[in-house]
Amino acid sequence: MKITVLTLFPEMYEDFLHTSIIGRSIDRGIAEVEFVQIRDFAHDAYRHVDDHPFGGGHGQVMKCQPVLDALHSVKKENSYTMLMSPAGHPYTQKKAHELSDKDHLILLCGHYEGLDARINEEVDELVSIGDYVLTGGELASMVIMDSVIRLLKGSITEGSTEEESYENGLLEYPQYTQPADYEGKKVPEILLSGNHAKIKEWRTEQSILLTKKERPDLFKAHEFTKEEKKILQRLQKEGKI
Ligand code: ADE
């Protein structure tokens, strides 16, 4: 997969692209990342990329011309273009899976008070990484790159993402490692039992309880499997839920 990032601040990505799983995936050629400096497309002597908003108001707005010229310089038939924006669709794990099938992703990062709204018509979608406002789209684009690159074949051990939070609609169960007793805090006995069926049931139970507590919205929307329903009914009977 190729990812092209359109930004005014490519230096923000340096450590991110050379660290851990993302760094390794890029070294191995699983993902290729390129940057386009939007300012290189500004024509005036001061290389302005922004101007005052029509109708008045605070701050500056990024202009159509440099942004769209930058976009058109890299956009091809197989490109999928996304504009990072607090006014976009909420980003989800489902979306990360969809994006991991694309050949070429273009991530457009705005700054200042936003972008001229006519730019929106030239992208496939606007995407938001959460209900808060960042100073620019760069961190949002890193979130998208990270979540997509780790899903690419060869990036991390196959199967290791399947039981993670959001993959099946519930949050992931709690995990523990050595020591079994850390300053009096003990690992749940069941995990030391070697009884794989019981461990699996306990993990599903924990996923259900955790999702109900931390994410009632996900819990409400979840379509419980037959096995999960059985556990849910037992938890209700025991008054745990
Ligand atoms: N740019 C500023 N805030 C953002 C957000 N929450 N998501 C995506 N892009 C942004």
Image: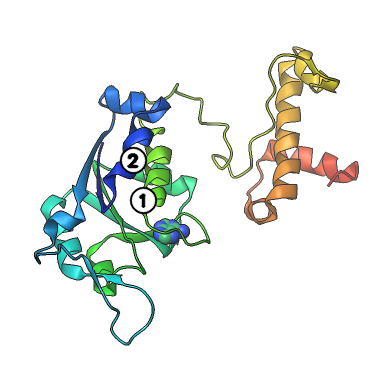
* Residue type (three-letter) at the residue carrying disc 1: Glu
At which x and y percent is residue 99? 35, 45
Left or right, residue 22 beside residue 72? right
Q: What kind of element bears circle 2?
A: helix
Residue 177's disc number: none
For disc 1, the neighbor class at 10 Å (few under 14, some 14 to 19, many from 20) is many
> Would you name the residue on which mark 1 appears?
138
Spatial separation of the CA atoms under disc 2 and disc 1: 8 Å
Q: Quadrant where the N terminus lies?
A: top left
Left or right: 24, with 41 as reference point: right
Residue in view at x 41 percent, y 59 percent: 135
Which of 218 and 6 lies nearest the eye of the viewer?
6
Check disc 1 and report its element: helix, strand or loop.
Answer: helix
In this view, the residue in front, 102 or 231, is: 102
* Above or below, 240 relative to 133: above
Q: Which kind of residue does numbered mark 2 sit on?
A: Tyr
Report the residue at 76% width, 42% height from top: 209
Residue 92, horizontal then vertical, whole percent: 48, 50
Where's ligand 1: which quadrant?
bottom left
